[in-house]
Image: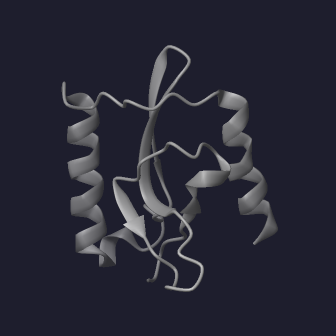
Amino acid sequence: MSHSGAIEVAKIDKNLQPIVRVIDDWFTNRPLALLFEAKVGKGKLLVSGIDFWQDMDKRTEARQLLYSLKKYMCGNRFNPSSEVDAKDLSILSSAKNQK
């Protein structure tokens, strides 16, 4: 998959359920996600491993997905069931820095 990077959600919280799941291979079968949502403090968070910045003018499907995600987050259905501590999300920034 281009323009995306899977997120190892079990490192954040083993109970997180991805909206879009990725399976790396059938040997390791790690719980990976391209999209997941969580309650963080008093707020809600949608996390994406999809690049919504580069070459968006050439990626119609990415523009449509971003539009749909924004619409979803503005609606009543965006109500994550999993709670995550903000400090547990620091794994995301350290993973990004390792690439």
44 shown above or below 3: above
- State how the image is colored: one colour
- Outermost residue, top side: 42
What is the quadrant of residue 82 in the picture? top left
Taking the image as shown, residue 54 lies to the left or right of residue 27, namely left
| Coordinates of residue 99 in the picture (x, y in percent) | 75, 72
**Quadrant showing the N terminus:** bottom left
Tell me how many marks there are: 0
| Coordinates of residue 87 in the picture (x, y in percent) | 73, 31
62 shown above or below 48: below
Q: Residue at x 28, y 42 (%)?
A: 70
46 shown above or below 63: above
Q: Residue at x 46, y 82 (%)?
A: 2
| Front-most of residues 51 and 14 | 14
Q: Residue at x 30, y 27 (%)?
A: 79
Taking the image as shown, residue 86 lies to the left or right of residue 66, namely right
Taking the image as shown, residue 59 lies to the left or right of residue 18, namely left
2 shown above or below 39: below
Q: Residue at x 47, y 20 (%)?
A: 43
- Outermost residue, front side: 27
| Coordinates of residue 66 in the picture (x, y in percent) | 30, 54
| Front-most of residues 92 and 58 | 92
| Coordinates of residue 17 in the picture (x, y in percent) | 41, 48
